[in-house]
């Protein structure tokens, strides 16, 4: 598989699979109202570890801030103390995430109340997730100051993907370990709809749908109320309600 | 029920905040990419790129610069041989100047087999002055400032390079500091380890090759416009000088002995 397939087709395929898969699950969930609730209970049971939740939150938030504000991160890193603090925090969160996710995988393997298909995809996702964490931690240790060089390599690469003109060379020039981190992330994104983790995304989608429909529903109610008050039928047949 | 609404409101607030952040981030990148610097022509000398382009496009067909007569006279030293006012009038409308009986113009007309120079009436006075300024400081003979041998760098220039390397001074076009990915002797933990250690890079590549190397981005970005700058010639030279100083023990020793007067010079350098 060439670089163009890995860094151009693969990310878009993963994103398409995620969107299509979650939408399908959302549509299925609307037919079976209890389905997401039951699934989410199982997912919550597996991901209940507080250390895991905090470390993943720190890592995801850090990646998100780095992606949204590359200039701010580089400015922060221009001071050695700031750089050491940020990298130290990220590394601690990464190590904690690796440890707690190992525990999570062990807990997952102990469970047996699932179908073979779900079991396969859940295990595959956790394996990919573990690969992402381990490759991320090793990259941070072996290739110093990823929060700085990531801003001038991986962030522009992701931005180029978003713009629809992938700058493949930005990713292919990176060490194999970093490339593994990137490619495993795309693979994990592609697998999410087939796992029980997608129930979280379905729940978010449902909340968004409710939020979006709220103004329309309110407007519809207001219109119904207004039309009821100003019903011309009352003028013609005042005795009838 | 009230609790559910609160959670939804939080989700909504998060989505709005995210949208706002995305909207704020995009213009800042556009502004950064839009930075242009006409004064930076890669030579460190003050002439506009437009003047150079106009000279190449309109003058070089008939004139040389220091290589003798072609169709018209050699333009090396023309700003010393002729007065600026006369040159302005002649370039703008040579036919008018010849018809007016100007002795210099008439003599040139006779000397060059009655071949008259085209009237560049479309060029403004400023454009002609810019071309004359370009010729006055060396024209096509001007060598880019970054081609200077790093051995001739002053302590101030080397210190400027050190600051650029460590990101203590921002590059004009916002290029990332070398220390992000590279290290040199003395950088300690501050140096990155994604790229190679650059301590001996000057000795390995020598001056001209390093000059060429510093003219290109470390990471080729297909989507980046070729118009966008990377390092100015002066910044490129300063970084090269610092790499030389960090790789050659003797040079490092002399560089370390920057006296106080030079430190003041460093402070004003690059502003």
Image (cartoon, coloured by chain):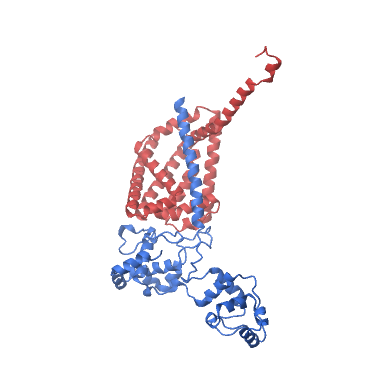
Nearest the viewer among A57 and A198 is A57
How far across and down, in percent of the image, does residue B230 sit? 47, 63
Residue B183 seen by the camera: yes
How far across and down, in percent of the image, does residue A41 sit? 43, 30
Taking the image as shown, residue B166 lies to the left or right of residue A238, namely left
Nearest the viewer among B12 and A35 is B12
Res B127 quadrant in image:
bottom right
Residue B67, placed above or below residue B19: below
Taking the image as shown, residue A32 lies to the left or right of residue A64, namely right
Q: Residue at x 37, y 74 (%)?
A: B151
Res B10 quadrant in image:
top left
Residue A10, placed above or below residue B230: above
In the rendered image, the quadrant that contains the C terminus of chain B is bottom left
Residue B134, placed above or below residue A42: below
Nearest the viewer among A104 and B153 is B153
Q: Which chain is red?
A: A
Q: Residue at x 43, y 68 (%)?
A: B234
Q: Which chain is blue?
A: B
How far across and down, in percent of the image, does residue B94 sit? 64, 79
Furthest-right residue in view?
A236
Taking the image as shown, residue A103 lies to the left or right of residue B71, namely left
How far across and down, in percent of the image, does residue A74 sit? 40, 53
């Amino acid at each position: 598989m060439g670089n163009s397939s890995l860094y151009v087709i693969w990310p878009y395929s993963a994103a398409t699979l995620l969107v299509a898969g979650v939408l399908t699950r959302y549509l299925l969930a609307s037919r079976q109202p209890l389905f997401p609730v039951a699934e989410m209970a199982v997912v919550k049971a597996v991901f209940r570890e507080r250390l895991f939740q905090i470390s993943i939150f720190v890592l995801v938030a850090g990646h998100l801030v780095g992606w949204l504000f590359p200039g701010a991160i580089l400015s922060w890193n221009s001071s050695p103390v700031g750089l050491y603090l940020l990298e130290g925090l990220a590394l601690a969160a990464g190590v904690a995430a690796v440890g707690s996710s190992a525990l999570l995988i062990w807990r997952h393997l102990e469970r047996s109340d699932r179908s073979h298909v779900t079991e396969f995809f859940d295990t595959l996702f956790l394996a990919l997730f573990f690969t992402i964490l381990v490759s991320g931690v090793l990259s941070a240790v072996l290739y110093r100051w990823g929060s700085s060089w990531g801003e001038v390599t991986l962030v522009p690469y992701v931005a180029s993907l978003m713009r629809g003109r992938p700058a493949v060379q930005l990713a292919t020039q990176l060490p194999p370990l970093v490339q593994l981190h990137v490619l495993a992330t795309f693979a994990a994104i592609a697998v999410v709809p087939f796992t029980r983790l997608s129930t979280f995304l379905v729940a978010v989608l449902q909340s968004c749908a409710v939020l979006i429909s709220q103004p329309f529903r309110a407007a519809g109610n207001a219109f119904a109320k207004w039309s009821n008050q100003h019903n011309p039928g009352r003028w013609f047949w005042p005795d009838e309600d | 029920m009230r609790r559910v609404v609160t959670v939804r409101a939080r989700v909504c607030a998060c989505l709005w905040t995210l949208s706002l952040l995305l909207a704020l981030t995009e213009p800042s990148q556009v502004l950064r990419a839009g930075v242009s610097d006409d004064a930076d022509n890669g030579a460190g000398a003050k002439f506009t790129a437009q003047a150079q382009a106009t000279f190449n496009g309109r003058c070089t067909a008939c004139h040389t610069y220091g290589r003798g007569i072609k169709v018209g006279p050699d333009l090396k030293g023309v700003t010393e041989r002729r007065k600026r006012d006369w040159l302005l009038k002649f370039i703008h409308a040579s036919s008018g100047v010849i018809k007016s009986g100007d002795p210099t113009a008439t003599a040139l007309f006779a000397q060059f087999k009655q071949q008259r120079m085209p009237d560049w009436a479309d060029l403004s006075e400023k454009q002609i002055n810019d071309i004359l300024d370009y010729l006055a400081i060396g024209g096509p003979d001007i060598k880019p400032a970054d081609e200077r041998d790093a051995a001739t760098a002053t302590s101030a220039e080397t210190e400027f390079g050190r600051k650029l390397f460590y990101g203590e001074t921002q590059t004009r076009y916002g290029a990332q500091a070398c220390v992000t990915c590279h290290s040199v002797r003395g950088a300690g933990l501050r140096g990155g380890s994604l790229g190679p250690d650059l301590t001996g890079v000057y000795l390995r590549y020598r001056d001209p090759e390093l000059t060429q190397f510093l003219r290109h981005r470390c990471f080729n970005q297909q989507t980046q416009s070729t118009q966008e700058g990377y390092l100015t010639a002066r910044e490129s030279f300063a970084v090269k000088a610092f790499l030389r100083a960090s790789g050659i023990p003797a040079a490092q020793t002399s560089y370390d002995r920057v006296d106080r007067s030079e430190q003041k010079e460093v402070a004003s350098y690059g502003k």
